[in-house]
Amino acid sequence: MILHGNRFMEILLIEDNPADIRLTMEAFQELKVPNHVHVVMDGVEAMAYLRHEGKHQDAPLPDLILLDLNLPLKNGREILEEVKNDENLQHIPVVVLTTSRAEEDVLQAYRLHVNCYLTKPSDLDQFFTVIQEIQRFWFGIARIPRYIANEGDKK
């Protein structure tokens, strides 16, 4: 069982495609590991979630962000830049999970300090494998910081 300090792992999925949201949720459910996946469908709502604004004032700070690049209102590159330049958020690992294979997108994401860049596979089994590996690596192998905001001291 993968718990981070006796609590569920909090994952923020920033994705606007309902089919990709459904697949990602199904993949995490199939893993049968304790996590909470929170979904926001545009960049403005993503930043409101991360900054505990409006309806997200009680939202837990995620342990991991899964970020699509092509989003409405504010794209994934803008979100990544804001997260990595915000001292209250920059510690959160960000995994870009997108359809783009463009070398320019990969390079720009790493220049903006993404922790990992993955291209979504079109094959369903491969997609499930990618989600399984994300879960295995980030919550099983890698050590990620436990942030005070998750303990009820939100800023």
Image (tube, grey):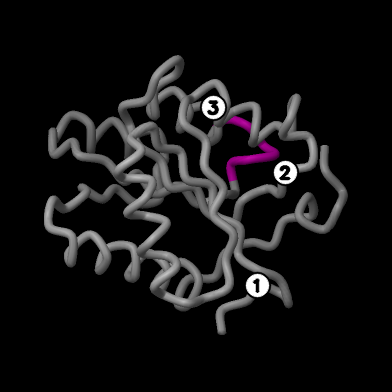
Q: Is residue 123 above or below residue 103?
A: below
* Disc 2 to disc 1, C-alpha distance: 17 Å
- Front residue of 47/94: it is 47
Q: Mark 3 or mark 1: which is in front?
A: 1
Question: Dividing the image into 4 quarters, which one contains the C terminus?
Answer: top right
Residue 41: within the magenta? no
**Of the residues shown, which amino acid type is indicated by label 2?**
Ala
**SS at mark 2 in the image:** loop
**SS at mark 1 in the image:** loop
Q: Residues within 10 Å of mark 3 (few under 14, many from 20)?
A: some
Residue 59 numbered tag: 2
Residue 4 numbered tag: 1
Q: Is residue 46 above or below residue 124?
A: above
**SS at mark 3 in the image:** helix
> Which residue is drawn at the image coordinates 40% and 43% (left, top)?
114
The answer to whether residue 40 is left or right of residue 16 is: right
Q: Which residue is mark 3?
A: 82
User: In the rendered structure, which disc, 3 or 2, sits on the residue that comes first in sequence?
Assistant: 2
Q: Quadrant of residue 75?
A: top left
Magenta highlight: main SS = loop
> Which residue is drawn at the image coordinates 55% and 31% (left, top)?
46
The answer to whether residue 38 is left or right of residue 66 is: right
Which residue occupies the extreme bottom position in the image? Answer: 1
User: In the rendered structure, which disc, 3 or 1, sits on the residue that comes first in sequence?
Assistant: 1
* Disc 3 to disc 1, C-alpha distance: 25 Å
Q: Which residues are magenta?
A: 85-90
Q: Is residue 108 above or below residue 93?
A: above
Q: Are marks 2 and 1 in contact (CB under 8 Å)?
A: no
> Which residue is drawn at the image coordinates 57% and 66% (left, top)?
35
- Front residue of 151/84: it is 151
